Image (cartoon, rainbow, N blue to C red):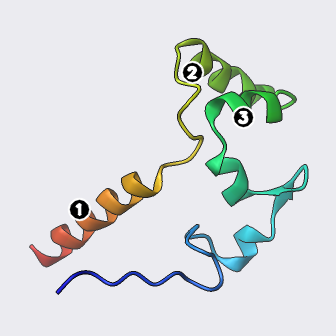
Amino acid sequence: MPDVELLCSTCKGSRFNQDTLNITYRDKGIADILEMSIEEGVIFLADVPAIGKKIQVMEELGLGYLTLGPSATARGHRDRRQQRSHHA
């Protein structure tokens, strides 16, 4: 039987609790920021040197197309690995 995936009505798949989702920076929530590409993040986070400088280097290395946070695919792979390790 195929896996069934349900989207959480609270986090809409971001996997953050409501308290975390309520935190914003410059009118964007943490889930929105982590979905940004590195290229977008360099501009958005330019005034936060501790982050901006690090992701600027990533952009200069040609990684601007990656997202700031893990992709849904990467999270899915991680979750499956964790499930297998718990059942081993």
Whole-angstrom CA distance, mark 1 to mark 3, is 29 Å
Q: Earlier in the sequence, mark 2 or mark 3?
A: 3
What is the three-letter code of the residue carrying label 1? Arg
Q: Is residue 63 left or right of residue 2?
A: right
Alpha-carbon neighbours of circle 1 within 10 Å: few (<14), some, or many (≥20)?
few
Pointers 1 and 2 in contact (CB under 8 A)?
A: no
Placement of 28 over or under 19, stated as above or below = above
What is the three-letter code of the residue carrying label 2? Met
Tell me where residue 49 appears, x and y as whole percent: 79, 25
Placement of 67 over or under 58, stated as above or below = below
Most extreme residue toward the right, as rendered? 26
Alpha-carbon neighbours of circle 3 within 10 Å: few (<14), some, or many (≥20)?
many
Q: Earlier in the sequence, mark 1 or mark 2?
A: 2
Read off the residue under disc 2. 58
Read off the residue under disc 3. 41
Whole-angstrom CA distance, mark 2 to mark 3, is 11 Å
Tell me where residue 9 appears, x and y as whole percent: 62, 86
Q: Where on the picture, by quarter, is residue 21?
A: bottom right
Q: Which quarter of the image is occupied by the N terminus?
A: bottom left
